Amino acid sequence: MAEQWIRKREILTELALGAFVSGEALASQLGVSRTAISNHISGLEEYGVDIYSVKGKGYRLNGPISLVDEAKLKEQIANRCFYFDEIPSTNAFILKHAEDLVSGDICVAEYQSAGRGRRGRVWVSPYGCHLYFSMFWQFPHGMAQAMGLSLVVACSIVTVLEKLGVKDVGVKWPNDIYLEGRKLAGVLIEMSGQTDSECNLVVGIGLNMAMGEQHASLIDQPWSDLTSQLQMPDKTALLALLQKQLQQDLSLFQQAGLTAFTERWAAADLFVGQSVKLLMGQDEVHGLCKGIDDQGAIVLETENGLQSYIGGEISLRKAD
């Protein structure tokens, strides 16, 4: 770990106790100058950490911080784990190093400077507030074999959250995870390779753990986080469970296809049986959501009968 992050994490450890801590006290405890403390505080704020400062009292965190226990995480999974305090994108790291990885290897970061969501959206990624995770997987028979994979990943996330006691969680086609009717997590799958031969892919997941006010203002849709739970899930345990569940589910998907997950999807689908609309560029399609087909397409009952729709530029909404 870089020297600057050792110091910053030491400061966060003190601030996480909840009380105000003066700059002088922090400097004394860490054996550095008062100026160094001020610089580290400013640096943390630039990375999105919400720190409350009061003259004469010192500093205090204005919201929870959840950091990964790197040693414990690496003990709990069999695959390689690359852990960073900061990185442009965990997905980009996996894609760059794909030739050296095996299925199930993961990359985890506390902060992403260039986090991305579906359709080119920016994924707000403040330091230590959320979960940023990517896993490598290889399909020997090409991209066609991966049809419907994003729905499988959504099922995996729901399973893990339910194991940790999270209630009222479900899915919105194709792969958004909702908690209490608002978006909790998203999935971004990227591929490289051939349609009918070996291809590499990365499963990227962003999950909101504790959203601060300053970051919430940057999000253009209803959101949720895990602070509403009676007990906040441990981030390290969540990551370890997620890696194992994904490895198990992707192996099953590779052998049996999407049909092995249709029951799990149906149980978690928040829109099945409801009147919905699909936004496709300038076009809208209205109908009754009837779930998914064997390819992972969403099925609507429309005035023209049952119709299936699939593609990366489709957005699902409740009907007005």
Image (cartoon, rainbow, N blue to C red):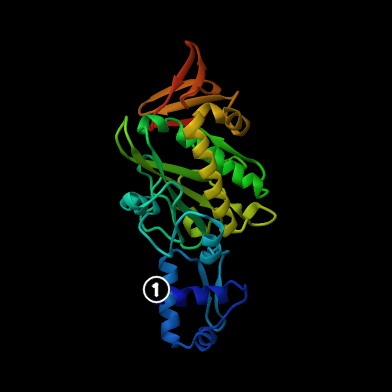
Residue 226: give x, y in percent of width and height: 60, 52
Residue drawn at the location 49% of the way across and 73% of the way down: 9
Q: Residues within 10 Å of mark 1 (few under 14, many from 20)?
A: few
Above/below status of 232 relative to 195: below
Residue 82: give x, y in percent of width and height: 43, 59
Residue drawn at the location 45% of the way across and 26% of the way down: 278
Pick the quarter of the image with the N terminus. bottom left
Q: Is residue 253 left or right of residue 269?
A: left
Any part of residue 174 in sight: no
- Circle 1 sits in a helix, a strand or a loop, which is it? loop
Q: Amino acid at mark 1?
A: Ala
Residue 94: give x, y in percent of width and height: 37, 51
Q: Nearer the viewer, residue 177 or 203?
A: 203
Q: Nearer the viewer, residue 247 or 112?
A: 247
Residue 262: give x, y in percent of width and height: 56, 28
Above/below status of 291 relative to 122: above
Residue drawn at the location 56% of the way across and 58% of the way down: 76
Above/below status of 103 relative to 25: above
Which residue extends farthest top? 304
Q: Nearer the viewer, residue 37 or 260?
A: 260
Q: Nearer the viewer, residue 99 or 135?
A: 99
Residue 139 figure quarter:
top left
Any part of residue 17 in sight: yes
How many marks overall?
A: 1
Which residue extends farthest right? 230
Q: Is residue 89 left or right of residue 177?
A: left
Above/below status of 253 relative to 53: above
Residue drawn at the location 38% of the way across and 45% of the way down: 121
Label 1: which residue? 2
